[in-house]
Amino acid sequence: MKSRIDQVIKRVQAEYLDTLLPSRDPLLAGMEAFAAAHGHPIADPEVGQLMRVLVRAKQPKHLIEVGTNIGYSVIVLGRECPADAVIETIELDRVILANAQRFVGEAHLTCEVKFHQGAALEVLPTLAGPFDFVFIDCVKTEYEQYLDQLLPKLAPGAMIVCDNLLWGGKVAEDVHDPSTDALRAFNERIASDPRLTTIVLAAGDGVGISIVN
């Protein structure tokens, strides 16, 4: 167990870590303001920076994002991808998807982005894969189902990144509601599934990083 475990990631530490993040360019800063004003849950900037590091290191060619929202993560991922990469992304809401397409268009990414409108559990079976990078940030009660649908489409070495796994700290507390219980079960699943090598980090609202064995 960590020394002084109760002193890891309190407000003062979190605020200090935020000072180490690079400033966002006008597009991403504008998207963060838009998301805050309209109640869109996008990836925390700390999570965005983590994904930049992961994508730049792995250089994936076929990425799938479950949960587009306004396209913030698509831009973060796409800016680090090689030009011959393809990002596929799924969003249920047509209006939100239209905003995502507008923002992604403004980013002028060199890689290809394929937008899919619909419920993720209905869209995922229609996608061929194989995928070598996955980002999951969608309906929390469906995370395990997303994983089950995606695993057959992932080659060894594929990376799976899942957001919101700490769920505001509730997964570690005596809190029971559908999303919290589902995320708690999902964390235990990815930590013990023999097909995966996983770590869950206290970045943003909790990020799981798994490699397919």
Image: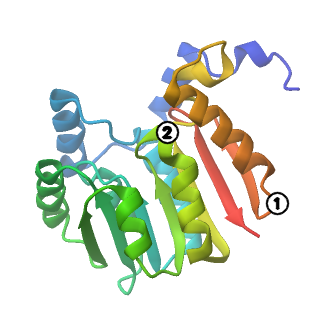
Instruction: Place residue 153 in its image quadrant.
Output: bottom right
Question: How many dots with numbers?
Answer: 2
Residue 111, image x, y percentages: 31, 78
Viewed as shown, does residue 101 lie left or right of 181?
left
Instruction: Place residue 82 in its image quadrant.
Output: bottom left
Q: Amino acid at mark 1?
A: Pro
Dot label at residue 115: none
Q: Amino acid at mark 2?
A: Thr
Circle 1 crowding by C-alpha within 10 Å: few under 14, some 14–19, many from 20: few
Of labels 1 and 2, earlier in sequence is 2
Viewed as shown, does residue 121 lie left or right of 92?
right
Residue at 52% x, 81% y: name it. 130
The residue indicated by pointer 2 is 141
Task: Work out which quarter of the rendered image holds the N terminus and state it.
Answer: top right
SS under mark 1: loop
- Cα distance, mark 1 to mark 2? 22 Å
Q: Are marks 1 and 2 in contact (CB under 8 Å)?
A: no
Task: Work out which quarter of the rendered image holds the C terminus and state it.
Answer: bottom right
Q: Is residue 79 visible?
A: no
Residue 94, image x, y percentages: 14, 54
Is 182 in front, or is 14?
Answer: 182
SS under mark 2: helix
Residue at 20% x, 43% y: name it. 31
Viewed as shown, does residue 47 lie left or right of 34?
right
The residue indicated by pointer 1 is 194
Residue 28 against residue 113 in the figure, above or below: above
Residue 69, image x, y percentages: 27, 48
Circle 2 crowding by C-alpha within 10 Å: few under 14, some 14–19, many from 20: some
